[in-house]
Image (tube, rainbow, N blue to C red):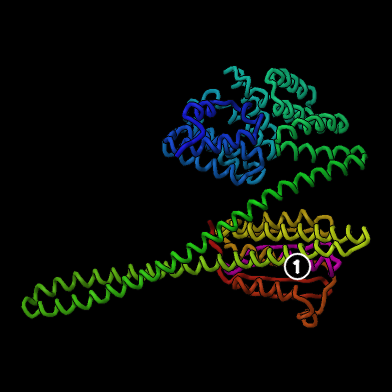
Amino acid sequence: MCFSQTRDEIEALCSLGYNDIIGDLEGKRDQYEEALAAAKEFGMDDEVALILERLALISHYLHDFEKALKYSFEAVDYYESKGDLKKLANLYTDLGFSIKHIQLDRSIEYFRAALKINQLQNMGADQAKYFNNYGTLMGMSGKLDSALYYHLKSLEVCIAYKDSLAMPYSLNNAAVIYSKMGSYKKAFEFMDQSDAIRKLEDNDLSWADNLAYRADIFYEMEAYDSAAVYYEQALELSQTSKFVNLITFSLERLSYCYEKLNDAEQAMKYYKLLNEHKDSLLSAETNAAIASLQEEFNAAEKQKKIAEQSLELTKQDLKIERQEKRELYIIFSVLALILFGGWVIYFQVRKRKTERLKLEHAKAMEKAELEKQFVEEKLRIGRELHDSIGAQLTFMISSVDNLSYLEKEEKVLLRLNKISDFGRNTMKELRTTIWAMKNDDGTLNDLVLKINELKISVQEVIDLKVSVRLSLDHRLNALELLNLYRIVQEFVQNTVKYAEASFVSIAFDLIDDKINMVLKDDGKGFDVAANQYAGNGLANMQQRCESIKGKFQLSSGAAGTELVCTLSGSGENT
């Protein structure tokens, strides 16, 4: 196989510094992906691990968190196999920092693992990154004193090792903590020191980072006009460098600053830009998800065929084994007439072996049958999703075709808005189903996180109150996750449409080792018997509960409506 990159070119690419990488994220991503394949072919194991680290960093900055985690875990496996604790600690730090906005508790665990290695090893200048990033997590947790302690400790390491590359990060983070604590003068002193170093780097992305940090100080001072000036400069540079995280952050802060300044026009401008930016990210994620789903669907077909072949081979082996046992029994019976004593001993040995083979074959058949059922269930979900998305896309295409028959521009715009809303809803339905399928071995925590997303989306029309009185580590499979979430979604929609309620409470508890979900609202009730078949909403919720072997109960009165779904199986702690 021929590769466009030589060994020397791969080594040169691996020697690039941090600023060289973040200055051209998409370009470097393509180069490193090509280098990864070449390095594997050349057997350059150390370079493969380093390239995986760089790809994880680039994927994080490009907002592709799934790939970032994939590359990080591959690198972790390599360093663990080599026993390279220093590089493993460094990777734990990057991994923890990349998931800080997704799983803060898990992020802190990775940092503590890195700090533990740091205590056992002389990590040298690398300690600065560990302390600085751990300080950031402490700040996110609201522990400002601890955050400042670790940022200043990081700065001490940078000064001791004369690490001018890492020093601005420690200065910037310490400055923001000082501003949160009200020490604005100290905050600006630290920012001025950081700016002096960053000007020497001549890197647009690093300078954009500093502009955003300076804006953060003004933001904490509630000097929103000054903050907006620096956020706008940071936005312009981050858009040039395609730094997705900083673009999102700057747009959010600009919209908020202008809202506080009572400049509705500018606030709405940046709010719209923020939504367009998020939609572009969502489209990219959805396209990748559809491609992933198609691959899973094809893989499931192959798995089903393999499972069927395995089951058939197991049956044939069992048939042959039974035939062999019959033949052996006849032989042993004849030999018993000649040497009865020897036959007794041999028969007992053979009997134990036969029983063991029966047990092994029975287990093999049971395993093959279970694998087949599991694959068929995934296929059913895949076909259902395929048919659903196909029907919805057909509706959208037909609606667009019908626009040519509308003469008035107002009607065309109205129809386009409806198609847009329908497309967004379709995208949400797709993401929800993909979310459930990817969490086949999920937990109650995954469901609660998904409900919290729903809570944010409906907070302007109704208040959702979520309470959990059992361990969040209880296991839920993909069907249970999807159907429980759909029940919550349907209940909230019905409450908003008909109940005139002010809140919906969602409670999870454990009754007789069974997960119990209770949904309540404080709206006007209705006659359950009279409305049982008035629409598909109630029937759908009941069908979804019973499809996962749950017990469905519904009651309604003047004090509101209550729905209970109790799963028949008991969840296990992970």
Looking at the image, residue 360 sits to the left or right of residue 23; the answer is left
Please name the residue shown 91% across and 37% down the image: 261
Amino acid type indicated by mark 1: Phe
Looking at the image, residue 12 sits to the left or right of residue 139; the answer is left
Q: Position of residue 485 (x, y in %)?
A: 68, 63
Residue 102 seen in the figure: yes
Residue 507 is covered by the magenta coloring: yes
Image quadrant in which you'd find residue 298:
bottom right
Looking at the image, residue 363 sits to the left or right of residue 555; the answer is left
Please name the residue shown 30% across and 75% down the image: 319
Q: Position of residue 227 (x, y in %)?
A: 83, 31
Q: Position of residue 52 (x, y in %)?
A: 53, 37
Residue at mark 1? 491
Badge 1 marks a residue whose secondary structure is helix
Residue 324 is covered by the magenta coloring: no
Quadrant of the rendering where the N terminus is positioned: top left
Would you place residue 533 above or below residue 101 in this image?
below
Looking at the rendering, the stretch of residues picked out in magenta corresponds to 488-516
Please name the residue shown 88% across and 41% down the image: 267
Query: Observer-nearest residue: 336 or 429?
Result: 429
Q: Position of residue 536 (x, y in %)?
A: 75, 75
Give neighbour class at mark 1: few <14, some 14-19, many 20+ (Cα, 10 Å). Answer: many
Query: Observer-nearest residue: 391 or 63?
Result: 391
Q: Residue furthest left?
A: 338
Please name the residue shown 23% across and 70% down the image: 352
Residue 83 seen in the figure: no
Image quadrant in which you'd find residue 445:
bottom right
Query: Observer-nearest residue: 526 or 163?
Result: 163
